[in-house]
Amino acid sequence: MLLRTVFLFSLLFAASVMSAQDKKADAVFSGALESVINLDGALWNTSGDDFLSGERLKFFKWNSEQKDSARAPRYSNTPDMTFLGKKVYECIFRFEDGKVSSVYISLYNRGDAGNIESGSVLQKTIGGFKESIGKWTGVEGSKAQKDKIAKANVYSITWKKGDVELSMKWSYSGRLSEKSGRTSDDFRAEYIKLDITKNASASGNDKTSGSKDDASAKSSSSKNGGLKENLKNENNDVYIADIPMVDQGQKGYCVVAVVERVLRYYGQDIDQHQIAQKAGTENSGTSLSEFEKALKSLGKSLGVKYKSLYESEIAKIGEQAERGDLRCIPDTMKLVSQYNRYAKKAGCSKVDKNKYINGNMYDIGGMMNAMKPEGLKMLKVEGDKSAYARFTKQIKEYINLGIPILWSVRLGMVQEEKLNPQVNGGHMRLIIGYNEKDKKFIYSDTWGADHTFKKMTMDDAWLMTTGAYVLIPRRN
């Protein structure tokens, strides 16, 4: 009996040592994603803490304080990752109840990788991925399917192995002949991505997939009353909790990343590259006019209604100048005159308009940059009290409904509490709450977990504001 007990103890000890060694081995990661994606189903039993350990810490970081997603690349100098020998531009592991629930891999996107030069190259790239994934899984993929998502054609091929489902999706703008590879003049490859999820049919929960043209059908929390349940009130901070974090990476994708955050908060499965396709987003960013045009057009298919709450005079002038509208000249002259009335009170020098006029040439940018933040703050806070009061009132009203505000700003105007990856220029972020006692807004940026929850005085926020917008869920 004693010998048997010792023998059993030895087996258990050996098993525990082997298990620990296996975990340690699993944490060794050189950047090849297929090495951490188990097709035998063990993937879904991987905890967040087990996943984000060892060598993986060089590549991945938590995307939020809730640890509901881990994103790579961790930093701009993170070593390259690959999938089946091909470069990966972004990877996100998502977690539910502490376990892996899905994996997203960006195999190509225009914002990070630049343009694919032709339709035939895109077809060859997709064919290469199809062959590699088929060999890796050992199963044949489905026939290519075509769906509509946010008014764009999205093509997909699916592989199912056990309780793992892999779906490669790609899209392009313009026209592409599948037979010849010829394209229209406006052809543009948009993205190729791989979504890895649980195979619902393996567990008897298969769903019939139909057209995804109306994304509102996917919305869960958009049956409006439930949004208020996300409100928190702590130490006079009234804020919306648990808005998913989306990291825009090194791209100028703040606008589409912010929109993705809001749509995911409303329960929709859509990403920034799909939104960028319709918004005409370039690597350097999206103009406000293109942003508004896209959201007005896509509102119904995204299950939301777009509404503009405020647009500053500076933003309007910038848009006028960008499209060559000569009304930007008198509008700028008027704004500078208004600024000069408050400049002295703020301790700033007046702007000499003549310095920026040479015959029929007007240096609009020079005049704008000559206006100091202190003077502009005095102008906006003291000179436009009614607009300021209306702005703060609307912000609070929508926050109290559980609806975040898409907040367009001009960075570099005020000192912020955390160092931002971007220090000046146009940017979009979210206002997620307010503190009436301290007269502060609570906001969040698309730069990862460290930028989830930040505060700024309402006066400073008003100074840097160029626009404020909301996406209101449509009732089904």
Image: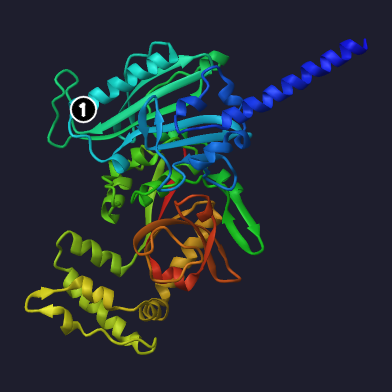
Res 222 seen here: no
Using the rendered view, name the quadrant where residue 91 is placed: top left
Looking at the image, residue 130 sits to the left or right of residue 321; the answer is right
- Looking at the picture, how far across and down is residue 312, in whole percent? 33, 67
Residue shown at the point (15%, 63%) measured from the top left = 325
Looking at the image, residue 187 sits to the left or right of residue 207; the answer is left
Three-letter amino acid code at the position of disc 1: Val
Residue sitting at the far right:
1
Q: Is residue 116 above or below residue 180?
A: below
Residue shown at the point (59%, 28%) measured from the top left = 25
- Looking at the picture, how far across and down is residue 250, in whole percent? 37, 49
- Crowding near pointer 1: few (<14 within 10 Å), some, many (20+)? few
Q: How many marks?
A: 1
Q: Which residue is mark 1?
A: 121
Q: Is residue 172 above or below residue 74?
A: above
Looking at the image, residue 444 sits to the left or right of residue 154; the answer is right
Residue shown at the point (26%, 74%) measured from the top left = 368
Residue shown at the point (51%, 27%) measured from the top left = 36
- Looking at the picture, how far across and down is residue 106, in whole percent? 38, 34
Using the rendered view, name the quadrant where residue 40 is placed: top right
Between residues 47 and 29, which one lies in front from this camera angle?
29
Between residues 262 and 383, which one lies in front from this camera angle?
262
Q: Secondary structure at mark 1?
A: helix
Colouring convention used in this rendered image of the protein: rainbow
Res 327 seen here: yes
